[in-house]
Amino acid sequence: MKNKALQILVIWIAASPVVALAQAPKDGVYISDEDVKAVLKHSLDTKRTNPDNTLRVVDMGKYQLGVAVIHRGAMGGGGGNAGGGAAAASPVLACGEQRPGATGLTGIFHDDTAESYVVISGSATLIMGGTVVNGRRSAPDAEVTTILNGPSCSGTMVGYTSREIKTGDIIIIPEGMPHGFSAIPDHVTYLSIRPDLKKVLQHGYVNPALSK
């Protein structure tokens, strides 16, 4: 009986690395310029109100990686545009600081995912940092929670800094940092790379424009 148990233990230990390796990607993942354009076209054709479009959520073994493309049209100064797109809010869960009567630009932060923006077209004024006040938590079944960025909080931003961004710029936004836009002269289109260390995003998601 003891020898049998030892044999089982040896087999389990030997198999464990194989199981771990099987969860990691076996090949590189290639996303072409044509893929990006197809997703942007699909977003336009289907009249999506959310400009944020995840292309894929890639299983990296110990974590996932979301890759998205976002296209935002013109907006004047003084407007508000949450960096993560429209986050359907939970009707009961408040987030951020509570400051009754606070007004201003709106933004969003994500609990578990950082973002790296790569601007591929256009320009904008990006606002980052500070605090979200009178925020609303994204609903558990909202797209921003399940596919785009994971659990998020959107609301009025205070104490932020502004920076002009343009084609070719790269911006890194840590998890938990409020961000949004205050002005877009014509348009801004950017890629967003989103490491998902806690695997909160939909496993293996592929944009409908790429799954045909």
Image (cartoon, rainbow, N blue to C red):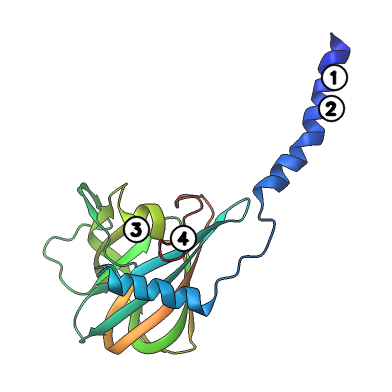
Quarter holding residue 123:
bottom left
Q: Which mark is residue 148?
A: none
Mark 1 crowd level (few <14, some 14–19, many ≥20, 10 Å Cα): few
Depth check, mark 3 against mark 4: the one in front is 4
Under circle 2, the secondary element is: helix
- Residue behind mark 1: 6
Quarter holding residue 183:
bottom left
Label 1 with label 2: CB-CB less than 8 Å = yes
Q: Is residue 128 visible?
A: no
Q: Which mark is residue 144?
A: 3
Q: From the viewer's perspective, is residue 17 above or below residue 195?
A: above
Q: CA distance from mark 1 to mark 3?
A: 48 Å
Label 1 with label 3: CB-CB less than 8 Å = no
Q: Amino acid at mark 4?
A: Ser
Under circle 4, the secondary element is: loop
- Residue behind mark 2: 10
Q: Residue furthest right?
A: 3
Q: CA distance from mark 3 to mark 2?
A: 44 Å
Relative image position of residue 45 (x, y in whole percent) = 29, 72
- Going from N to C along the chain, the mark reached first, 3 or 4, is 3
Relative image position of residue 191 (x, y in whole percent) = 46, 75
Q: Amino acid at mark 2?
A: Val
Residue shown at the point (84%, 14%) measured from the top left: 4
Label 3 with label 2: CB-CB less than 8 Å = no
- Going from N to C along the chain, the mark reached first, 2 or 4, is 2
Under circle 3, the secondary element is: helix
Q: From the viewer's perspective, is residue 65 above or below residue 61?
A: below
Relative image position of residue 205 (x, y in whole percent) = 47, 55
Q: Is residue 53 visible?
A: yes
* Camera-nearest residue between 98 and 22: 22
Depth check, mark 2 against mark 4: the one in front is 4
